[in-house]
């Protein structure tokens, strides 16, 4: 089954390479999927009846992996693409670190107790403060205008929010499957997906935000 899934992903990636016109639609699919994922997380475990089948899980896997890859490719094509990729990674990792320490110190209100009991709203706020602080520091150092500041802070907040959804979504799938680690490559650390689950959500959304900024929407 794993080989078959990998083959499907490989074929679809090749088709995306051959048909660059699909790029915006892949990102639109990502935005729609992560909006749906937010609803699924909020309504778990009742929502699990809608995606418990193997076919649904395959489609969900494609909706997570393909847009993440496409977003990475598109960001890479931008001027300073490598720095932009590093920026979204730093935002997500900073939010993770801020959430961990603020959650440990102040966490009282559970974020999604049926999905991930260890996460709290205080942790989310702490992660948001850290990421916004980093964004503001970059803005000051680069002498951004007020409009650029507002757009960047809004974008950073969106990235933090969607990275939390990515993390919770993977936790939801693991809880439904009754497993602790998503793979055997990093046992005790949740598996490989626990290292990148937030990024698979954040990267395509970051690409959409860049597109919006380029078109003057932000």
Image (spheres, helix red, strand yellow):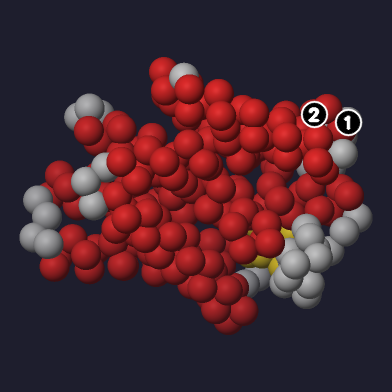
| Residue 33 % position (x, y) | 60, 31
Mark 1: few, some, or many residues within 10 Å (few <14, many ≥20)?
A: few
Taking depth in this image into account, of 75 and 211 the one nearest to the observer is 75
11 and 174: which is toward the camera? 11
Tell me the tag on residue 56: 2
Q: Residue at x 22, y 33 (%)?
A: 214
Q: Position of residue 195 (x, y in %)?
A: 62, 63
View extreme (right): residue = 178
Residue 149: image location, x then y, percent: 19, 52
- Asked whether, in this view, residue 201 is left or right of residue 84, the answer is right
Give percent across and percent down for residue 39.
67, 35
Residue where numbered disc 1 is placed:
53
Tell me if residue 210 comes above or below residue 83 in the rendering: above
Q: Quadrant of residue 207?
A: top left
Disc 1 secondary structure class: loop
SS of the residue at dot 2? helix
Residue 177 left/right relative to 82: right
Q: Which mark is residue 21?
A: none
Pick whichever, 114 or 92, lies toward us: 92
Q: Quadrant of the N terminus?
A: top right
- In contact (CB < 8 Å): disc 1 and disc 2: yes
Residue 62 in view (yes/no)? no
Q: Nearer the viewer, residue 208 or 61?
A: 61
Cα separation between marks 1 and 2: 5 Å
Residue found at the very far bottom of the displayed protein: 105
């Amino acid at each position: 089954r794993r080989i078959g899934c990998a083959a499907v992903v490989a074929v679809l990636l090749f088709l995306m390479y051959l048909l660059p016109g699909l790029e915006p639609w892949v990102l639109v699919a990502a935005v729609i999927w992560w909006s749906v994922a937010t609803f699924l997380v909020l309504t778990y475990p009742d929502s699990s009846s809608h995606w418990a089948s193997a076919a649904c899980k395959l489609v969900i896997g494609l909706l997570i992996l393909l847009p993440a890859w496409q977003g990475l490719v598109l960001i890479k094509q931008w001027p300073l693409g490598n720095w932009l990729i590093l920026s979204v990674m730093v935002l997500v990792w900073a939010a993770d670190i801020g959430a961990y320490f603020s959650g440990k110190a102040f966490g009282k209100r559970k974020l999604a107790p049926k999905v991930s009991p260890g996460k709290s709203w205080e942790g989310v706020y702490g992660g948001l403060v850290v990421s916004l602080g980093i964004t503001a520091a970059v803005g000051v150092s680069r002498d951004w205008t007020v409009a650029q500041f507002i757009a960047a802070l809004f974008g950073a907040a969106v990235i933090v929010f969607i990275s939390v959804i990515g993390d919770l979504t993977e936790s939801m799938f693991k809880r439904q499957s009754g497993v602790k680690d998503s793979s055997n490559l990093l046992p005790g650390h949740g598996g490989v997906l626990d290292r990148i689950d937030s990024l698979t959500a954040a990267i395509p959304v970051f690409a959409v935000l860049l597109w919006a900024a380029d078109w003057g929407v932000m």
